[in-house]
Image (spheres, rainbow, N blue to C red):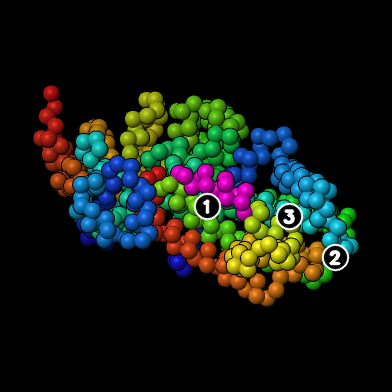
């Protein structure tokens, strides 16, 4: 078995309830963690705790759980845009986040400028971008291609999502994070997304998918993680994870 | 700290596109475009010249070169400092969506704002040089040393301040308001529009206030800026050293605070 590409050990993130942020800043700077412990656990909660798992390259993981059980938090930890309070997460390789597809777009810039901007933010070099530019525009569809030089402000939300998706799906980062993107867009776009995802998986990318859609999960994923109340309750096949999920939420 | 410096350096292309984006957004929509980065300091300079030069006759002290040039040599650097201060404070909060989806070193966002305002300062330099010609500025070796040194020190200082303020502002939104007040105060806490020497020779000011005043790193930076055209304003070695130490200290403190606050900042965004 090859070395894991994502490996989490006793992962935990703590949030503080309420709005006592001023105090938090003081604690962070002057007292570190000790004082926070002393204050008791009443005003803090752990959206995720004691998570340990390994993902080997090429695996497709589906993350299942009720709303608010820390699925998105987990994706943010893998993406590296959240720092754990407990344990560690090691990610070898860059991450292509299909999370908020139009994040990073500036309304006042044109589609072309935004494409350059977002692609560079995601780590595409100038030469790579020049080579992929046409492909990205092509994938985004006629509508986007026609209005490439008008400000993104005038784009419909569907067009933005398309442009965002085509940029991120052209990245050759080995890890793909997907959070319910398939829920947006029309049927044609969704079909395109499915095809792209299939293609990327065939290429050997690692996928972490968060979804409530049983069809999507069984279609793409080979392994399922069921997260309940911040803990990893089931780590097995997709079917096992789905069964555990359904056992908790009886389908009427 | 060295690893995060390396990380920022490795992402300098990201820094460049962020600065380009900020400038493009700022100037695309206005008719006068980049001229705004000149109009603002020039207008402020004209006001100070009227109040302190015409009404209070500060200008009489300057021999050879004149008070308008003195104001301009300070005001362009001040404009950079002041606008970078206010814009970097909101650097993280304003770009929250970007920060929570794309993994780049977070330091890039405040540093980008500082760099963007530096580009505007550069755009103003030709005007400053023109003013130096018109108002008979003294060109000496201090011209060639003073300005680059002042820029370097100001960069150091601003990066430190922006890292501290941008991260603190996420936890305490009051910081943004406080900065507006601090901007107005700081203008008078450094020799931007009045000569440094006036503070030192003022009789009504106790010595400890004078020492405190000189502890402000901006004092040394402004003196370097002025000395480019007014050789007699060249700061003493003591002042230069304390200014450099102050800038580096602020940078280290800002970097440290940023890293300390980073986990909470990411949760809060």
Determine whether the residue tagged by mark 2 lies in a helix, strand or loop.
loop
Determine whether the residue tagged by mark 3 lies in a helix, strand or loop.
loop
Residue A102 location, quadrant? top left
Residue A248 percent location from the top left of the image = 12, 35
Of residues A227 and A38, the one drawn nearer to the viewer in this rendering: A38
Q: Would residue B210 be found to the left or right of residue B135 on screen?
A: left
Q: Would residue A156 be found to the left or right of residue B45 on screen?
A: left
Determine whether the residue tagged by mark 1 lies in a helix, strand or loop.
helix
How would you classify the magenta stretch by its main secondary structure? helix
Label 2 vs label 1: CA separation? 36 Å
Residue B232 seen in the figure:
yes
**Sooner in the amino-acid sequence: mark 2 or mark 1:** 1
**Sooner in the amino-acid sequence: mark 3 or mark 2:** 2
Check residue A123 in the rendering and tell me which mark sits there, or answer none: none
Check residue B138 in the rendering and tell me which mark sits there, or answer none: 2
Look at discs 2 and 1 and give the one toward the viewer.
Answer: 2
Circles 3 and 2 on the same subunit: yes
């Amino acid at each position: 078995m090859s070395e894991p590409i994502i490996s989490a050990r006793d992962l935990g993130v703590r949030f503080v309830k309420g709005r006592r942020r001023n105090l938090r800043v003081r604690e962070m700077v002057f007292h570190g963690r000790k004082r926070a412990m002393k204050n008791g656990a009443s005003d803090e909660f752990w959206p995720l705790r004691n998570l340990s798992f390994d993902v080997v390259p090429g695996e497709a993981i589906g993350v299942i759980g009720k709303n608010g059980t820390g699925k998105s938090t987990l994706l943010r930890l893998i993406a590296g845009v959240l720092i754990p309070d407990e344990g560690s997460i090691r990610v070898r390789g860059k991450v292509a986040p299909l999370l908020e597809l139009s994040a990073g777009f500036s309304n006042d810039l044109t589609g072309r400028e935004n494409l350059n901007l977002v692609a560079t933010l995601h780590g595409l070099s100038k030469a790579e971008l020049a080579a992929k530019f046409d492909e990205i525009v092509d994938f985004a569809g006629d509508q986007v291609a026609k209005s490439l030089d008008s400000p993104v402000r005038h784009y419909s939300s569907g067009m933005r999502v398309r442009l965002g998706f085509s940029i991120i799906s052209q990245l050759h980062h080995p890890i793909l994070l997907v959070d319910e993107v398939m829920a947006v867009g029309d049927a044609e776009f969704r079909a395109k997304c499915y095809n792209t995802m299939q293609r990327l998986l065939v290429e050997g990318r690692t996928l972490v998918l968060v979804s409530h859609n049983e069809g999507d999960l069984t279609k793409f994923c080979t392994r399922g993680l069921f997260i309940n109340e911040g803990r990893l309750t089931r780590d097995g096949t997709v079917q096992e994870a789905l069964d555990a999920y359904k056992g908790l939420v009886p389908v009427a | 700290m060295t690893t995060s410096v390396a990380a920022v350096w490795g992402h300098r292309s990201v820094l460049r596109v962020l600065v380009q984006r900020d400038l493009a957004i700022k100037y695309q929509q206005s008719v006068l475009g980049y001229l705004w980065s000149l109009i603002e300091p020039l207008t402020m300079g004209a006001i100070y010249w009227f109040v302190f030069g015409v009404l209070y006759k500060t200008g009489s002290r300057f021999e050879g070169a004149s008070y308008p040039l003195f104001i301009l040599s300070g005001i362009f650097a001040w404009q950079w400092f002041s606008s970078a201060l206010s814009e970097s404070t909101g650097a993280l909060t304003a770009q929250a969506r970007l920060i929570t989806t794309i993994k780049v070193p977070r330091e890039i966002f405040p540093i980008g704002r500082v760099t963007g305002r530096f580009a505007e300062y550069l755009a103003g330099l030709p005007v400053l040089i023109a003013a130096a010609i018109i108002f008979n500025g003294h060109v000496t070796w201090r011209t060639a040393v003073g300005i680059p040194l002042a820029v370097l020190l100001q960069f150091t200082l601003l990066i430190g301040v922006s890292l501290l303020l941008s991260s603190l502002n996420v936890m305490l939104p009051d910081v943004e308001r406080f900065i507006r007040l601090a901007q107005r105060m700081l203008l008078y806490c450094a020799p931007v529009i009045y000569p440094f020497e006036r503070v030192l020779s003022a009789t009504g000011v106790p010595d400890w206030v004078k020492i405190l005043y000189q502890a402000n790193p901006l004092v040394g930076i402004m003196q370097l800026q002025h000395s480019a055209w007014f050789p007699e304003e060249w700061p003493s070695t003591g002042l230069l050293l304390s200014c450099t130490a102050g800038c580096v200290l602020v940078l280290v403190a800002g970097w440290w605070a940023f890293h300390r606050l980073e986990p909470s900042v990411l949760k809060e965004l």
